[in-house]
Structures are given as C-alpha cells and as structure tokens.
Image (cartoon, grey):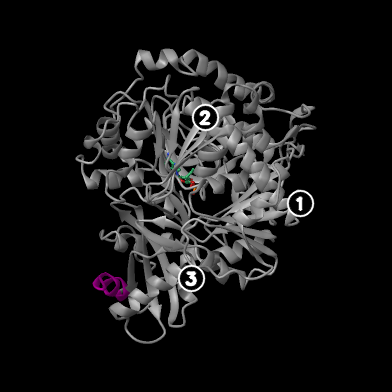
C-alpha cells in the first residue's frame, strides 16, 4: 500500500445484520436474492445484452441504437447510432398519461415559501427557458455555467440546456469567484445563469455579486441571466446581464427536444483530484441517463406514489443524478429544499418529512452526525411514519450513526441503503438493494447489477484477505468519458495505475467473508470534508498564494461532524503567526476556494518535516493533526526537533 494506505483503518468488526422485512421484499422492484444474482451474472457475463435490454425498455429513443457497446475500457462508447434527449426522457414522455398533472418537484424555500411544479408545468418552463437560451445564442454543444441556489429554476436551467444539447457546468453555490472563473475558463462557457442570491440560515447569500467578480476573469462568457430569488440589490451590466423573468416574457413554450447522439455530452461537473486543478468530469447523454434511471429505480425502489427527498445540493453529483435526472426520468415526485437543516430550528427536516409525507429520504453521514448532536427531541416531535426507505452517501458511515438513523429516523422498519459512488461513476455502484440485501452498519454491501468491482494490490493482484484498492473491472454506461479538455489526464488519473485494465477509484476497501464491501476512505491526497472531495493540493496552493506564506502542507484529521477536518501546516516568510494572522489565512483560503475549504486548524511551523530527499512526511503531519503519537519510522526525518515544535503550536 502507499504511504496514505497505511493510514486506512479498518472499521470495527461489525456483526449486526438487518435483513429487509418480508413485507418490504414482497413489494420491492428487485425482490429476491435469486433475481439479483441472475441480473448480476448477466451484467458480468453479457454486459451488452444486459444494458441493451434495459436501454430499450427504459429510455425513450428517437432512433434506436445500432450497437450497445463499442471498444474497450476506457474508450468504450455506448448505444452508437441512437438518438436521444435527456430533457425529453425526464419530461415529454410523462405528458401523455396520468403523470401529466403529477407533482414533479415539490419545493420549499428556507423562509417557508412553497411551490409545486407538475410535469406539465415543468415541461412548459423548461421549453420556454430553452427558447431563452436560443435567443441568447446558445447552440448545441455550447457550455453554460449555472451558479444558483436550490430553487426549481436550477432544475429548469439544467433541463433547458439538455433540451438543446448545451452542456451545463453547475458550480456549487458555496464556491468562490475564483473557483467560478477557473471553471468558466476551463469549459469556455458562453453564458452564466445565476440568481441575485439564496437563503441560508436566515441570511441572504449573494450570488450575483460573486459572479460579477468572476466575470472580471471570464472572457469567454458573453451574458449573465439572473433569476430573482431574494429581491436583494444587484448590479446589472447593460447588454450583458438580463433578468430571467424579463427574458421569459418574450418567448413561447414551443421547443422540441433536439435529437442528440447517444454520446452527446450532457454535462461537465468539476471535482477535486490529488494533483492539479479540479477536473471537469464529462458525462454523456444515453449512458448517464440509463445509469441514473436504473439505479434510482433499484436502490430507492421508486414507486408511482412515492414522495422522494434527496437533501443534497444540485451543485454536487448527488443532486444531478438523484434530484434531477434519475427521479424525473422515473416520473417520481422529487422534493427540493433550499436552505439549512437547522433553520428556523433543528426540526426543519422532520417538519418537511411530516408535512409532505416523505417516503424515501437520502442524506449524508455528516448530516446524520449533526442530527445526533442536536438531539432526539427534534425528530421525536414529528410524525415520521411515512418513511419507508433511508439512504446515505458521501463517506463511510460510522456504525453508531447508522444505528441512530435506523432507530430514531427509521423506527427500525426502514431499510438503509449506504450507497458508494463518485462524481466519475455517474450513479450508484455499490449499495444494498432494499428488498434483497441484509444490511450491516458501515458497509455499502454489494455491487449493483452491471457493476463488477474487485479489490487489488498495488500490483493489480486480487486481494484475498484484508484491505486493498477498489477498482472496476468492466466498463459501465454511466462512467465518465473524459476529463474535459484533457483526455491524457483522464487516462492517467483513472486508468494508468493498472495499465488500462481497471478503473481505479482512489478508495481503499476490503471484502468480508459474506462478500460485503467495506470502503475505508481515500488512498490519495484527497480530503473528504462533509462528504465532498477536496484536494490537499488545492488548499496548499491557495495558502502559498498568500504574500506571507513560504510553504504549506495540508492534511485531514478525524472531525466529529465533518468526517474529515482540514489542518494546515504553514511556514511564514515573516512573523511568528498571531491568532489574527491564522484567522486571516483561514479567510484567505475561504475566499480562494469557498466556504467548504475553510481550514479548521492552522499550525505555524518553523519548517515542515521532510525526508532527506525533500519529501514532506505527510504521515507524521496526519498523526500530529489528529493528536496521535507519531507512529512508524521517523529515522528518515531531516530535522528531528521540528516535530516537537509542531506539536507545541496548538
Ligand atoms: C468519494 C466520491 C457520490 C456522491 C458524493 C461524493 C466517498 C462516497 C461513499 C460511501 C464510503 C463513500 C469515496 C468516494 N464515498 N460514498 N457510501 N461509503 N465512501 O462524491 O465528491 O465524487 O466523492 O466519496 O471516497 O471516492 P465525490
């Protein structure tokens, strides 16, 4: 294993097992072990047959594909010859039957305002906004940046892009102006869609002002569309900036979906890696839509009358696949909430569950840990009996948090699906099937049908005992196709480690005697902060961009709520690092990347611990950051006194 690999601690031996109830199994979309095994074996032995049949049955084709898969991983192309449109798949298809007047989106704003859009109404808005895009000169293949709060118009904007075959690049509303500008630049976006602001914990988060700052460094962007959400003051630049509502007045709702090739790019979503700037993960239309559609149906066991709520932000892949594309493709009612879980009080989520009679609830371990800290008195004030299925995503869930979720939220009757996947995988890869799999707290259990993982050594040999590296041995339709503008980096990052044979996920994992997978965390220099990936390198470059920073090393440490916290070891050019200076450095990183990257600890170091060859010894820094005794070999350390000094600065 690598240096980082040695730090992966296997989760405690966990023997508890929770099989689904016979009532749940009886009604489930996949309802028996035998059915699962048949599907899984078919997916492994005959992937073209397996995915081809699903694609014919579950996707609406303008023209059916000629072949299911062409070429070896990583260059596999899917559904060649087919013509399709993701917006048509999510909307038009539902307008001829009883789903026409069914709620597509139930939305709640943080101040308490509510809107419901039926499939027909959502279709109407999407068609109109697609015509707005056309008027602004957006054509098939153009890139459009979306930087919005969690309002229905965010989903409308993405589906309008998809309708024309314009490629959306959504930037999470918590990112900074520099982060937006970098992404605008990398994708060569022509347009930015934003809002005046959004609501978070009772405060207005200004978005347009941040976009204005980004626009100073975004030469490819010609126009900005601004949705009015908060009513706050904004600066509108003449002939560049337009109000959403003004533009919508001048268009009609007639906008046929463009018939696109299966492999037409659907979106770019930037994500952090261990080296370099964020990677523009590119997903294409048919394969991604098939993955989002099938995994939603299997894992969330979607039924016609379900109210389904995924609490993620659409700015992350979870929201792309499991608020917008997956649920809407299945004709589901998808609930969307704008704000914080503790506003006006810590009962907000449970209030929403009761009021909307939510049946399926999908959230992150970091949120569950916050609920636990706030106390059982919040959920216990509400009737949560509508819930029938719970899910988690983003990081390994600690068994105690799993048990709390099971007991306090699920009342011991809801299966919990712990879903492992990544921005790059497009959809869920490893997860219990709620009507089939006996769950174990902390394990994402087994691969879904069509997914063939393995755990291997650094040399690519199968691991039979203990931990190793998690890889995928077969291509799948919803796999990323490239890193936008840098195909070499795509190959290098995901496929070079095992000579193109496997997709390397970057996670360490082990399999237990029952064949269950236990994901143990990243093996590279990637932090998982509140279920989101951040690269230590990005935080380091933000720090050294500060005038007074000579050198910086960033490591993660166990954090009660966030999973991992950010600890920065910094050597300064001058001064000894007062509390004010540390605070300034924190704010500096926050400004450069965004609030999610705000360091938890800054430690001023006279020098960083290095090997004689000059490599920073991160293993030592991780021990110090976690308050552990420094373990392992320190004999290669150049200057032994440094460790003491680092420990002192707390
Ligand atoms: C990384 C992917 C997929 C949407 C959210 C994050 C970690 C994700 C689990 C899980 C253990 C998990 C992995 C993965 N991860 N889900 N159920 N159990 N770890 O997407 O930002 O692309 O991050 O999140 O380390 O590689 P992402």
Q: For mark 3, what is the residue?
A: 542
Q: Quadrant of residue 361?
A: top left
In the rendered image, which residue does mark 2 sit on? 332
In-image side of 156 versus 445 (left or right): right
Dot 3 alpha-carbon crowd within 10 angstroms: few under 14, some 14 to 19, many 20 or more: many
Q: Secondary structure at mark 1?
A: loop
- Mark sitting earlier along the chain (2/1): 1
Q: Nearer the viewer, residue 445 or 542?
A: 542
Residue 366 appears in view:
yes
Quarter of the image holding residue 625? bottom left
Query: Residue extending furthest bottom?
Result: 574
In the displayed structure image, the side of residue 469 where residue 189 appears, left or right: right
Magenta segment: does it hold 505?
A: no
Q: CA distance from mark 3 to mark 2?
A: 42 Å
Q: Residue placed at 45% from the left, 18% from the top?
A: 28
Residue at which label 1 appears: 139
Q: What segment is highlighted magenta in the picture?
A: 641-650
Q: CA distance from mark 1 to mark 3?
A: 35 Å
């Amino acid at each position: 294993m690598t240096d980082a690999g040695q730090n992966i601690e296997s989760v405690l031996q966990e023997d508890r097992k929770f099989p689904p109830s016979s009532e749940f199994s009886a009604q489930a979309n996949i309802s028996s072990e035998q059915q699962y095994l048949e599907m899984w074996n078919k997916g492994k032995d005959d992937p073209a047959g397996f995915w081809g049949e699903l694609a014919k049955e579950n996707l609406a084709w303008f023209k059916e594909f000629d072949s299911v898969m062409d070429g070896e991983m990583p260059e596999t192309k899917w559904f060649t010859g087919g013509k399709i449109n993701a917006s048509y798949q999510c909307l038009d298809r539902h307008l001829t039957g009883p789903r026409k007047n069914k709620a597509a989106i139930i939305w709640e704003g943080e101040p308490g305002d509510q809107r419901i859009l039926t499939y027909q109404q959502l279709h109407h808005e999407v068609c109109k906004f697609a015509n707005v895009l056309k008027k602004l000169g957006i054509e098939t293949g153009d890139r459009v940046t979306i930087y919005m709060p969690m309002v229905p118009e965010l989903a409308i904007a993405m589906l309008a892009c998809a309708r024309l075959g314009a490629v959306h690049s959504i930037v999470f509303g918590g990112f900074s102006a520099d982060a937006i500008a970098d992404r605008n630049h990398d994708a060569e976006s022509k347009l930015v869609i934003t809002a005046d602001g959004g609501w978070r914990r009772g405060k207005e988060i200004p978005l347009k002002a941040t976009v204005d700052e980004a626009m100073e460094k975004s030469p490819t962007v010609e126009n900005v569309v601004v949705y009015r959400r908060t009513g706050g003051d904004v600066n509108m630049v003449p002939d560049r900036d337009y109000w959403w509502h003004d533009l919508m007045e001048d268009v009609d709702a007639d906008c046929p979906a463009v018939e696109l090739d299966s492999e037409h790019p659907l979106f770019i979503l930037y994500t952090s890696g261990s080296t370099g700037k964020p990677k523009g993960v590119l997903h294409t239309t048919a394969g991604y839509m098939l993955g989002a559609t099938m995994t939603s149906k299997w894992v969330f066991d979607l039924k016609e009358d379900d109210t389904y709520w995924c609490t993620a932000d659409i700015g992350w892949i979870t929201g792309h696949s499991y608020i917008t594309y997956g649920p809407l493709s299945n004709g589901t009612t998808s609930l969307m909430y704008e704000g914080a879980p503790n506003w006006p009080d810590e009962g907000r989520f449970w209030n929403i569950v009761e009021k909307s009679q939510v049946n399926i609830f999908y959230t992150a371990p970091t949120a569950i840990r916050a609920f636990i800290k706030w106390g059982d008195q919040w959920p216990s004030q509400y009737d949560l009996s509508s819930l029938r299925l719970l899910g988690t995503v983003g990081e390994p869930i600690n068994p105690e948090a799993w048990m709390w979720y099971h007991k306090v939220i699920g009342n011991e009757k809801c299966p919990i699906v712990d879903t492992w996947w990544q921005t790059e995988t497009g959809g869920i890869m490893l997860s219990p099937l709620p009507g089939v799999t006996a769950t174990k707290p902390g394990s994402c259990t087994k691969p879904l049908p069509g997914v063939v993982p393995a755990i291997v050594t650094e040399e690519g040999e199968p691991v039979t005992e203990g931990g190793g590296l998690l890889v995928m041995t077969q291509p799948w339709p919803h796999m990323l196709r490239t890193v936008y503008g840098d195909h070499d980096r795509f190959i290098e990052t995901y496929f070079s480690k095992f000579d193109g044979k496997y997709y390397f996920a970057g996670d360490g994992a082990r399999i237990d005697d029952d064949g269950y997978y236990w994901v143990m965390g990243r093996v590279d220099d990637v932090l998982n902060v509140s279920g989101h990936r951040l690269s230590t390198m990005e935080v380091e470059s933000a720090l050294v961009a500060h005038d007074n920073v000579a050198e910086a090393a960033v490591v993660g440490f166990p954090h009660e709520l966030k999973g991992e916290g950010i600890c920065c070891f910094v050597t300064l050019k001058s001064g000894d690092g007062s509390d004010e200076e540390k605070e300034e450095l924190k704010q500096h990183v926050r400004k450069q990347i965004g609030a999610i990257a705000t360091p938890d600890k800054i430690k001023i170091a006279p020098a960083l611990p290095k090997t004689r060859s000059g490599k920073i010894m991160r293993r030592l820094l991780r021990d110090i950051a976690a308050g552990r005794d420094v373990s392992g070999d320190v004999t290669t350390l150049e200057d032994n006194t440094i460790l003491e000094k680092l420990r002192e600065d707390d």
